[in-house]
């Protein structure tokens, strides 16, 4: 009995350490007291839940949780270029990045964002980070327009590939051993995401568009020093506009649900 108690006590301590490690991962260092990455993850979870609830209320049962149909995805905020032009729903160019085609799709993308986002947010600052996220969402959907304009698209992966593309270019330019390790880490995530995309038939045009947008910013952004600081006012403005675009787009999406 004593042996069993010791064994279970050891297991309980191990589980407690694992739980503490998981919770500590939610407290990545940031320049201020909040995390843009966590806010983005929260918004994705909220709007996925809203989509599932709408599908359930419409009589689709629990199917939207794992395999929502195309009509529901478009209604919930997915990108659909014909409605962008015919109905003036330009907010879809951003809201699509907060919609997902099922729980597995959402979980994979949020794991990538959770792994990649805090590092880049701390490295670049909140304003540059949110600008990068929105900018690459736009370059991702723009690539989708030229590749398959009639296909509805959802998912944060355009922005995620944008973050990875940015990091690969940015850290490669830095050139020190730690930066190169981070570059390789990002490329590893890109490989995982690309393979996952092939398995589920994801929007590879959006992935490419997002990645190219991120690479462009990663090649242009000053790495460090006074030149980087001199760009702060510009990127503070870009960051503010990007945050406003997210709030406005998601607000117009919610209004459209009741229109």
Image (cartoon, grey):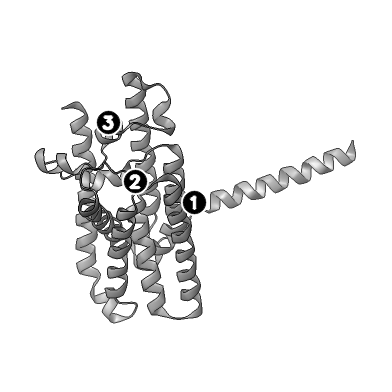
Proximity of marks 2 and 1: CB atoms separated by less than 8 Å: no
Q: Nearer the viewer, residue 26 or 98?
A: 98
The answer to whether residue 148 is visible is yes
Q: What residue is drawn where x is 30% and y is 47%?
A: 97
Residue 26 disc label: 1
Q: Position of residue 153 (x, y in %)?
A: 29, 44
Q: Give the percent coordinates (x, y) of residue 104.
A: 46, 40
Q: Can you say whether 223 is above or below 139 in the image?
A: below
Q: Residue at x 33, y 80 (%)?
A: 225
Residue 34 seen from this side: no
Q: Nearer the viewer, residue 217 or 120?
A: 217
**What's the distance in space between the residues labelled 2 and 3, CA to CA?**
15 Å
Q: Quadrant of the C terminus?
A: top left
Dot 2 or dot 3, earlier in sequence: 3
Q: Residue furthest top?
A: 59
Q: Nearer the viewer, mark 2 or mark 3?
A: 3
Give the mark toward the camera: 2 or 1.
2
10 Å crowding of disc 3: few (<14), some (14-19), many (20+): few
The quadrant where residue 257 appears: top left
Secondary structure category for the residue under label 1: loop
Q: How many marks?
A: 3
The residue lying toward the viewer, choosing from 254 and 31, is 254
Cβ–Cβ under 8 Å for marks 1 and 3: no
Image disc number at residue 2: none
N-term mark: 1 or 3: 1
Q: Which residue, given by chain and number where applicable, does mark 2 sit on? A: 155
Query: Separation of disc 2 and disc 1 at Cα?
Result: 22 Å
Distance between the alpha carbons at the discs numbered 1 and 3: 35 Å
Mark 1 nearby-residue class (10 Å; few <14, some 14–19, many ≥20) = few
Q: Which residue is mark 3?
A: 71
At label 2, counting other C-alpha atoms closer than 10 Å, the crowd grade (few under 14, some 14-19, many 20 or more) is: many
* Residue 102 location (% of width, % of height): 41, 37
């Amino acid at each position: 009995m004593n042996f069993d108690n010791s064994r279970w006590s050891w297991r309980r301590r191990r589980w407690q350490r694992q739980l503490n490690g998981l919770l500590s991962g939610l407290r990545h260092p940031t320049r201020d007291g909040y995390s843009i990455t966590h806010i983005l993850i929260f918004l994705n979870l909220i709007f996925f839940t809203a989509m599932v609830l709408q599908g359930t209320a419409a009589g689709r049962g629990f199917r939207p949780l794992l395999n929502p149909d195309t009509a529901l995805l478009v209604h919930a905020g997915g990108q659909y270029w014909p409605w962008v032009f015919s109905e003036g729903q330009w907010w879809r160019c951003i809201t699509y990045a907060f919609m997902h085609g099922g729980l597995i799709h959402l979980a994979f993308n949020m794991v990538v964002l959770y792994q990649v986002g805090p590092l880049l947010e701390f490295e670049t600052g909140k304003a540059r980070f949110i600008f990068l996220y929105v900018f690459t969402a736009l370059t991702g959907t723009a690539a989708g327009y030229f590749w398959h304009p009639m296909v509805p698209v959802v998912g944060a992966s355009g922005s995620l590939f944008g973050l990875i593309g940015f990091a690969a270019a940015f850290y490669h330019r830095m050139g020190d051993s730690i930066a190169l390790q981070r570059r390789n880490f990002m490329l590893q995530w890109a490989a995982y995401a690309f393979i996952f995309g092939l398995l589920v038939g994801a929007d590879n045009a959006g992935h490419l568009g997002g990645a190219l947008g991120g690479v462009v910013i990663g090649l242009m952004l000053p790495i460090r020093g006074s030149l980087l600081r001199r760009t702060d006012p510009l990127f503070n403005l870009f960051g503010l506009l990007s945050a406003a675009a997210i709030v406005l787009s998601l607000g117009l999406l919610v209004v459209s649900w009741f229109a």
